[in-house]
Amino acid sequence: MFNDNDQWGREPFQSNDGADEVHQEALQANSSVGDFLRKIFKGDKVIWSVFIILCVISLVEIFSATSTIVYRQQNQWGPILRHTMFLIGGVGVILLIHNIPYRYFSSLIFVLLAAIALLLLTPFIGTSINNADRWISIMGFTIQPSEIAKISLMGTIAFLLSKQNGQNDGLLFKWMIGLMVAVCGIIAIDNLSTAMLLFMVCYLLMFIGNVKFLRLLKVAGVLILFVLMFVLVMNVIPEKWTESGPLDRLSTWKNRITHFGQSRELSEEEYFTITDENYQVAHAKIAIANGGVLGVFPGNSTERDFLPQAYSDFIYAIIIEEMGLIGGIFVLLLYVIILIRSGMIAR
């Protein structure tokens, strides 16, 4: 009888096959998770990184800027949980759209047509929020048709740009300009600044999409001519026609253009007096001044308690107050990175 032990009584080495199998399974599981995440979050890593950074900044700043809502509702976590749900929903929409073949985006034209119909109906069935009749209530939810129109218009423009082949460029260009004029013209009736911004974004899309420079130059020339004629007509129309009715927005546009083009030196009393007209702008400037270079750090803003829409329209003023001029520039640079990176990918 032979003994398997050696001369010192030690047992021979036995391989631990069970541990090796567990290790291999763990490696395979990690590899599977990595493959799944790469499949879901496919695309440009730079854009994904910037997106995540912006989401984190928004969580911090919204949590800080909603102090008035927290006090009014007596619910500390309500606003931030609501914003978190919006972010999760937004990520879900991004992932859904990101994994849809681009050829299916041709259906956005139908969404755009529906948005145009809603824009036309808004003056008649719209709901007024913060003295703005730009909202429609559907099944308990309030939506801005202009937001739907903006997204669908930009998506449609991007799809049409992808269909350029050198032979149909002229026809596609006419379609793009026609859609831009129609949508922006309707939005401008109630919100001129949004319409101008949307037109410029679509114009920039065409520039990135390699539309012929001469065509873009012609559009710019026509636009400048239209603006000059518009300003001339506003100065000719009697003021009593703009006091009420469909032309009531003309008085607002006229005052803004007049104040922009004609600057007068304010007296010391006027400069330091906050009125109903300059309340929001004044407190936004105070927030920026409080921030300085380095800011007061998140959670220490004072102007969030004075600005009516500190968590939405004036969130950038709160960002500068809490993160300083450096933080404000950093946020702007994140959007510039997205723009540059998108242009590089498109070309």
Image (tube, grey):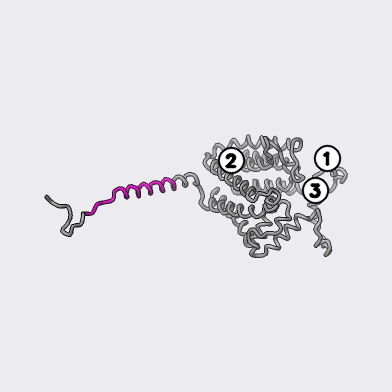
Q: Is residue 249 visible?
A: yes
Label 3 crowd (10 A; few <14 / some 14-19 / many >=20): some
Q: Is residue 57 left or right of residue 219?
A: left
Q: CA distance from mark 3 to mark 2?
A: 36 Å
Mark closer to the observer (1, 2):
1
Circles 1 and 3: CB distance less than 8 Å?
no
Circles 1 and 2: CB distance less than 8 Å?
no
Q: CA distance from mark 1 to mark 3?
A: 13 Å
Sequence-wise, the earlier of marks 3 and 2 is 2
Residue 175 horizontal/vertical position (percent) = 65, 38
What amino acid type is highlighted by mark number 2? Phe
Residue 103 horizontal/vertical position (percent) = 54, 37
Q: Is residue 212 visible?
A: no
- Magenta residues, dominant SS class: helix
Please give the label number shown on residue 245. 1
Residue identified by numbered label 3:
252
Please give the label number shown on residue 13. none
Residue 148 horizontal/vertical position (percent) = 65, 40
Residue identified by numbered label 2:
159
Mark closer to the observer (3, 2):
3
Q: Nearer the viewer, residue 138 or 22?
A: 22
Extent of the magenta region: 12-33
What amino acid type is highlighted by mark number 3? Thr
Task: Give the residue drawn at x 28%, y 50%.
Answer: 16
Sequence-wise, the earlier of marks 1 and 3 is 1
**Most distant residue in the left direction:** 1
Label 2 crowd (10 A; few <14 / some 14-19 / many >=20): some
